[in-house]
Image: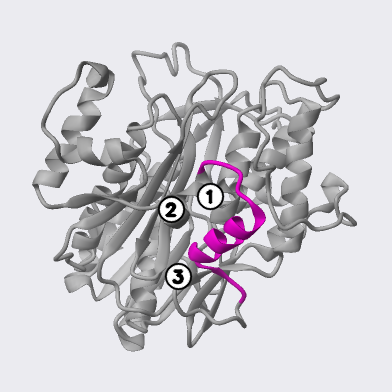
Amino acid sequence: MADEYQALLNNDTWRLMPKPPGANRHGIDYDETFSLSPVVKPVMIHAVLGIATSRQRPIHQLDVKNVFPHGHLEETIYCQQPPGFVDPSSTLLILTIPPSLRTWYQQFGTYTHQLGFIASATDTSLFVYRGATTYLLLYVDDIILTASSADLLQLLADRLHSEFAMTDLGDLHHFLGISVTRSSEGLFLSQRQYVLDLQRAGMAECHATSTLVDARAKLSATEGDPIVDPSEYRSLAGALQYLTLTCPDLAYAVQQACLFMHDPRKMHLALIKRILRYVKGSLFASLHIGTRRVDKPVAYSDANWVGCLDSHHSTLGFCVFLSNRLVSWSSKRAEAEYRVVAHVVAECCWLRQLLQELHVPLKVATVIYYDNVSAVYMAANPVHHRRTKHIEIDIHFIREKVALGEVRILHVPSQYQFADIMTKGLPVQMFQDFRYSLCIRSPDASTEGG
């Protein structure tokens, strides 16, 4: 803390003065406050890395130093001195440097626009350079930069460095806690160092398991005894949720564990420990991003009807592929099974818009596979039924996208429904087969297919 405080002093972050009367009155001096910077979505990272890998483009990472001094403060902001660092000569601080990540983002966006970048409409943390020759992803002070040539990448990196204090860390190898390994077969994303932090759960010596959840069991919010320390449960569940950035096979089990944050029971903690045992057994697995050309997107969607014992809600899941690479996945609760189709259609339409901005046009509709025959018929059949009034908006949305030729809803047999892994516990062999279909590999394993 002392070093950070000294850095703020060195940057002249504030001036000391007595508090003026009537300062900082809500509704007069200020109203809403927007202090955060947009952050890039995981699907955006997977899509951009997939395109760059398929085109054999260089990918660098840049680190910006001290983002807060950037930007211009338009208002006078008064605040109390922080406890433990109070200067008795005055009672109040006047900030002279913006305390907001939003001002940094605005300053960065203004400068990149001058260089020729355009902020994406689908995700404002993506900046596309002239003719899509360069993509830039921004996550606060971490940057991924990929260009059509090493010379262009270096030129733009130098121009960014001339305006902002930053370091070019070279080839992408570690971003947001994700380790990136590149080979002739593509990229491998993993969070191995993050996984190694099992000591705090007392699971370092545990025995590994090959599956995540019991295929027959369903959890309830009221069964079993409450655990003594709920904070430990919440901490572990949150840590496991972060692992789903590169471990789509964890999505369903972690989603189940996160449902009981408010009042976790012993049976819920047993699920957490089983997930940790599974994670230990898959320590060297990575999410593979292949080198095949980006052409057609394909999605799989499914719902486990009345998957919740307490609310009787369904569990929906989907996974979206670009060629042979997984770019988006989800496992969540929904009131109606048909709504899973609406969720995945919305995700696919968003992804199509993104690819258009990245100058990767799609000439064919996105095929969405679903194993519910009634839902497949409903997507194309204009007939209305009384029993579907509660999902009428979803039906109209899906039929519109089908009519526009953006998506096609097709039936798939359950044994090929990869999204099942996002909605329920599966038998060991089926779980392992579907896990492989989600592009989870070891760097030294064969990566063809998937």
Q: Is residue 183 visible?
A: yes
Question: Is residue 409 located in the magenta-colored stretch of the structure?
Answer: no
Relative image position of residue 151 (x, y in whole percent): 33, 88
Residue type indicated by callout 1: Ile
Secondary structure of the residue carrying tag 3 is loop
Q: Nearer the viewer, residue 192 or 294?
A: 294
Question: Is residue 439 located in the magenta-colored stretch of the structure?
Answer: yes
* Residue bearing mark 2: 417
Instruction: Give the mark nearer the N terminus: 1 vs 3.
Output: 1
* Residue bearing mark 3: 450
Up/down of 410 relative to 15, above or below:
below
Which contiguous range is marked in magenta? 423-442
**Residue drawn where x is 39% and y is 32% of the image:** 34
Q: Which mark is residue 421?
A: 1
Quadrant containing the C terminus is: bottom left
Relative image position of residue 20 (x, y in whole percent): 48, 17
